[in-house]
Image: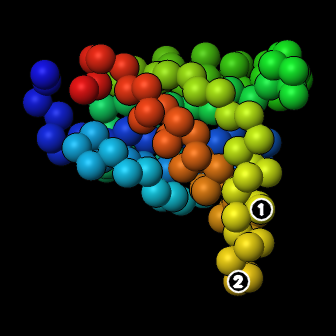
Amino acid sequence: MSNQNNSSVIALDMGQKRIGVAIASLVARIARPLTTLQHTETIIDDLKQLLVEHQAAALVVGLPRGLEGQHTAQTASVEAFVATLKKHIAVPLYWQDEAVTSHHAETELEARKKPFSKGDIDALAATYILEDFLQELPKELK
């Protein structure tokens, strides 16, 4: 087991305008929403800063696909972004299926009967992506 007691895992719910971000300690393994970033020209630097600030041992990216698991235009867009991102980060990157996480997040937030933003949906969707990833945590992160 590697010494990663202070390490975390960060997950992204990628969108064209916003990126939902969630975090979990590798010790407690409880995912929670962290923030929502605007998908602007500084996004690579913003993500690098988050990874360093939170001592991330890994980055998990939600892979968007169609309802039957097929690749879509959004899949291609996220894959292209991640190919660029990988050149700028030093931590391992993992893909996680993100089927219906945004819909699930919106449904949960509506059930709370409190105001919420699209950014809240994105961050909660990233939390669901991270929870799924933590269920089958790769051996090298344990």
Locate residue 21 relative to residue 105 in the image: left or right. left
Give percent across and percent down for residue 85: 55, 25
**Tag 1: Cα neighbours inside 10 Å, few (<14), some, or many (≥20)?**
few
Q: How is the image coloured?
A: rainbow
Q: What element carries label 1?
A: helix
Residue 47 to residue 110: above or below:
above
Could you tell me which quadrant the C terminus lies in?
Answer: top left
Give percent across and percent down for residue 57: 30, 32
Locate residue 69 relative to residue 90 in the image: left or right. right
**Front label number (1 vs 2):** 1
Of residue 37 and residue 59, the one placed in the foreground of this image is: 59
Locate residue 91 relative to residue 114 in the image: left or right. left
- Identified at 85% across, 16% down, the residue is 70
Residue 14 in view here: yes
- Identified at 27% across, 17% down, the residue is 140
- Identified at 57% across, 22% down, the residue is 95
Locate residue 103 relative to residue 105 in the image: left or right. right
- Name the amino acid type tagged 1: Thr
Of residue 78 and residue 70, the one placed in the foreground of this image is: 70
- Name the amino acid type tagged 2: Lys
Give percent across and percent down for residue 138: 36, 20
Q: Distance between the residues labelled 1 and 2?
A: 12 Å
Give the residue pinned by disc 2: 114
The dot on residue 107 is 1
Q: Is mark 2 on a helix, strand or loop?
A: loop
Could you tell me which quadrant the N terminus lies in?
Answer: top left
Q: Are marks 1 and 2 in contact (CB under 8 Å)?
A: no
Q: Which of marks 1 and 2 is nearer the N terminus?
A: 1
Residue 37 in view here: no
**Tag 2: Cα neighbours inside 10 Å, few (<14), some, or many (≥20)?**
few
Give percent across and percent down for residue 128: 58, 46
Of residue 112 and residue 38, the one placed in the foreground of this image is: 112
